[in-house]
Amino acid sequence: MASYIGRRKFLATLGGAAAWPLAASAQQPEQMRRVGVLQALDANDPVAKSSFAAFTHGLQESGWTEGRNLRIDQRWAAGNTGRLLADAVELVRLRPDVILAGGSPGLTAAQRASRIIPIVFINVADPVGQGFIPSLARPGGNATGFTNFEFAMGGKWLGVLKDIAPRAAQVALIVNPDNPNASIFLRSVETVAASFGVQTLATPVRNKPEIESALSTLAGGPVGGLIVLPDALVIVHRQLIIGLAARYRLPAVYPFRDFVVDGGLVSYGNKVAENYRQAAGYVDRILRGANPADLPVQAPTKFELVVNLKTAKALGLDVPLHIQQLADEVIE
């Protein structure tokens, strides 16, 4: 009897020992995947923070949590697009599973650094025309993503400006000539300018001193309004641009909501944070085995018109009722 009991204890002990490796195996941490983030914005800017938060939230909804099964390596150029290539090379050396690239400068740098690592891009106006991909439906290669622009937006910007400032006969187009999208943005406005009875003046700016000089020069001329074209540079320096437009009493249309929240007159454009949230979905699919060559590039579907009535009043402008009714948001 004693021998039988001893044998049972031995088997029980052996069974527990045999089960231990299985339990330990089940508790092993998930495989850590790696995502590189390459952006031209300033990481401390509220626009960058809210956009990145939308991206990480989108990843969490798909089951990816930083520190548990995901590592995110970030590089933010703070408006200095000249450093993006060096940042991209650094990221590639870390061997990420996928890179999130912001804007045409970011995508250019990422593709120069690697034609193998999958890239999900955002805020690229014309990826086919710029030679990044051969087709929107089947991008091929290692890059796919989301555009932030359609050609009709030029007419929207000019139309809103003329509705609010109908006497504007000459409109300055604030543009960063180093942005590969610059010619597309300019053409979208210039081709419809005559139908609105205005002349356009392309005004290139590459840095803070050029922004200050350009707006000071415009203030002394016949310019009746501004259209600030999309670029990381103008986002980084939006407080400066908004302040100078107010000082020189220049009605201005901006590409993103944050400009109006910070005191600008009016904006029309797609939702920046929404692009980042959608990009998280593509990053998730690639991490789970999808080939970027087979993921179609998606065009923006959500646009928003935002108006600041307080700024309009300070400029002595009346915002027409139909504009207020069309606006997605009116700041008073």
Image (spheres, rainbow, N blue to C red):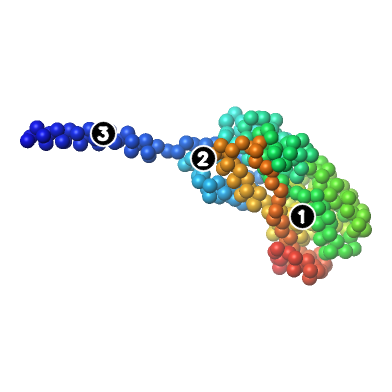
- Label 2 belongs to which residue? 70
| Dot 3 alpha-carbon crowd within 10 angstroms: few under 14, some 14 to 19, many 20 or more | few
Can residue 251 be seen here?
Answer: no
Q: Residue at x 48, y 40 (%)?
A: 69
| Dot 1 alpha-carbon crowd within 10 angstroms: few under 14, some 14 to 19, many 20 or more | many
Q: Quadrant of residue 137?
A: top right
**Mark 2 residue type:** Leu
- Is 166 placed above or below 64 here? below
Q: CA distance from mark 3 to mark 2?
A: 32 Å
Quarter of the image that includes the N terminus? top left
Q: CA distance from mark 1 to mark 2?
A: 36 Å
Label 2 sits on a secondary structure element that is strand
Q: Residue at x 66, y 45 (%)?
A: 42
Q: Residue at x 52, y 36 (%)?
A: 33
- Label 3 belongs to which residue? 17
The reply to whether discs 1 and 3 touch (Cβ–Cβ < 8 Å) is no
Label 1 sits on a secondary structure element that is strand
**Mark 3 residue type:** Ala
**Mark 1 residue type:** Tyr
Q: CA distance from mark 1 to mark 3?
A: 67 Å
Q: Position of residue 143 (x, y in %)?
A: 67, 36
Q: Quadrant of residue 223?
A: bottom right
Q: Residue furthest left?
A: 1
Q: Quadrant of residue 142?
A: top right
- Label 1 belongs to which residue? 254
Quarter of the image that includes the C terminus? bottom right
- Is 271 placed above or below 331 here? above
Q: Position of residue 321 (x, y in %)?
A: 78, 70
Residue placed most toward the observer, 263 or 266: 266
